[in-house]
DNA sequence: TCTCACAGGTACGATGTCATATGTCACTAC
DNA sequence: GTAGTGACATATGACATCGTACCTGTGAGA
């Protein structure tokens, strides 16, 4: 995240985008473009932490919108934790540690700018820790109905093995049902907000094929069996092995320099 | 979260708050009050998922502010995932699964409305899973400098044993340094965003006392030693035992009916 | 029965104005 | 010389008003 593709030779916070021509696609709101541009400039490092955004009037000119839109957009960016608006002083870019990394726009920008995939590694590590824990909890949970849904989800996967898109959806559904059975709404929400982005940005080398789907199915079966056997430990191990294994098989480059935080580690639970 | 203190006999979405008197404290922005009120009404169930918020004009009257403030506030609430604004149709309350549970305002409202502490249990379970995993990663990490900071943080705690406030700060700092050593910025950000809320809302029965601090110190020492010994498994176990143990000692009511998702479970990693 | 124009309600966006907070700098009093 | 004061510029906060775009239901007409 520290590396910078495009050096900023001017050092001025003037946004390098939004030249002219507001395409103004019907049906899209003006604000989302502004928000995306600002978020991107911050995440990419064009606007460094501590620096000040151009005042509202300037932003109006740059983006070609009214102050209404600018004000709302900057406020939204503030809500994402990327800037801090101060009355009479201006708007400053905050420290990255305050950024809301789970926010959709922020997450997308970070992943897009994540040259060596280090952030995706963290994403997978986080997801692994949470899902493994929830699988273990689900195994010892007394929620019978939820467990039936896990079995049903596995069967659904098996039936969709000939349809890549539907298989992928069923795959996600299985994971969601396991998390639901754990009763941990917070963990489930976190993983779900991460999951789509991770999948969409994985830049698969090999897409789903027959062998991959078979293997996925087997690993899910292992998770399922451990949960049904009420074996928390085994469920966690199986889930951890499944997610880290799946990621390591898909991860484009082994990435020698930056150590993958936890995805590299063997399932130790 | 389903239980409702105050039944809503009318079933109308008219906000039951903001009667009159805009106190208008100097220095506070109007929007934050509006946001808090709306978020609270949604979380408390006064505004049910699927129902429609009053139109902007009505909200202006109810809160006694201009449309500018209302528009910005509702947009902020949308950013938290609690409502979905639709051009020409109005603003609808979304399904709770789409709520941003890590948002500060939302989290505060949920915890305040969390009658049987079930959400706090989930919070602790989530934190446990992440911190245990990060402790394990830190143990096998090659980041030497970060590990020195862990030792320094432990010493800092030891030196602050006579000052409750500073000890608590050092406590949090130790945890943060362990997470930093893991290199998992995402997990660290998630835990940090829920940590303060969890602590502040724990409604301690017994506050920090000498014995509690000693015990905390011992448990931190165990985590520290495991990390320094590069023993990932032991580090995870120690961290898990520390957090769940600390929570179970502080948790006010054992809560017979609703099973604590994972905090009850023994450290299995 | 179906289609389409229209009205009403809603959010979106622009513009202008004033209020308020903050920092700077020249000026003044000591 | 220094501290205090006040004018001023600049920034965001808030309001009021206007017009536009979008959605939905309704009723006239084919």
Image (tube, coloured by chain):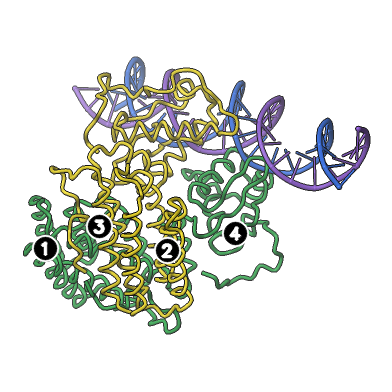
Chain colours: A yellow, B green, C blue, D purple
Can you identify the residue that label 2 sits on? A158
Q: Residue at x 46, y 43 (%)?
A: B27
Q: Which residue is mark 3?
A: A245
Q: Identify the chain of the residue marked 2, using the numbered disc in the image.
A: A
- Tell me if D7 is positioned left or right of A120 in this view: right
Instruction: Name the residue that disc number 4 marks.
Output: B49
Q: Which mark is residue B227?
A: 1
Q: Residues within 10 Å of mark 3 (few under 14, many from 20)?
A: some
Asked if badge 3 and badge 4 are on a common chain, one would say no
Residue B161 vs B138, above or below: the answer is: below
Q: Position of residue A108 (x, y in %)?
A: 38, 41
Distance between mark 2 and mark 4 Cα atoms: 34 Å
Closest to the observer, B25 or A269: A269
In the image, B91 versus B136, the foreground residue is B136
Marks 3/2 same chain: yes
Of badges 3 and 4, nearer the viewer stands 3
Res A244 quadrant in image: bottom left
Q: Are marks 2 and 4 in contact (CB under 8 Å)?
A: no
Helix, strand or loop at mark 1? helix
Residue appearing at x 43%, y 70% in the figure:
A150
Query: Gap in Å between the C-alphas at discs 1 and 3?
Result: 25 Å
Tell me if residue B105 can be seen. Answer: no
| B24 to the left or right of B52 | left
Q: Secondary structure at mark 2?
A: helix
């Amino acid at each position: 995240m520290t590396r910078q593709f495009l050096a900023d030779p001017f050092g001025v916070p003037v946004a390098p985008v939004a030249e002219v021509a507001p395409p103004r696609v019907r049906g899209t709101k003006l604000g989302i473009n502004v928000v995306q541009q600002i978020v991107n400039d911050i995440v990419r490092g064009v606007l460094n932490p501590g620096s000040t955004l151009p005042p509202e009037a300037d932003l109006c000119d740059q983006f070609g919108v009214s102050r209404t839109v600018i004000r709302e957009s900057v406020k939204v960016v503030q809500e994402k934790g990327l800037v801090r608006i101060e009355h009479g002083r201006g708007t400053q870019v905050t420290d990255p540690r305050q950024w809301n990394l789970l926010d959709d726009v922020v997450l997308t920008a970070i992943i897009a700018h994540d040259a060596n995939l280090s952030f995706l590694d963290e994403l997978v590590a986080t997801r692994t820790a949470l899902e493994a824990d929830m699988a273990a909890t689900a195994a010892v949970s007394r929620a019978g109905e939820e467990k039936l849904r896990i079995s049903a989800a596995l069967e659904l996967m098996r039936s969709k093995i000939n349809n890549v898109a539907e298989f992928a959806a069923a795959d996600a559904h299985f994971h969601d049902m396991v998390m639901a059975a754990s009763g941990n709404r917070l963990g489930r929400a976190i993983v779900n907000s991460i999951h789509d982005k991770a999948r969409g940005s994985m830049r698969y080398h090999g897409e789903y094929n027959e062998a991959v789907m078979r293997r996925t199915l087997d690993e899910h079966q292992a998770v399922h069996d451990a949960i049904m056997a009420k074996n928390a430990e085994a469920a966690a191990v199986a889930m951890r092995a499944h997610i880290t294994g799946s990621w390591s098989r898909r991860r484009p480059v082994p990435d020698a320099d930056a150590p993958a935080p936890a995805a590299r580690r063997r399932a130790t639970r």
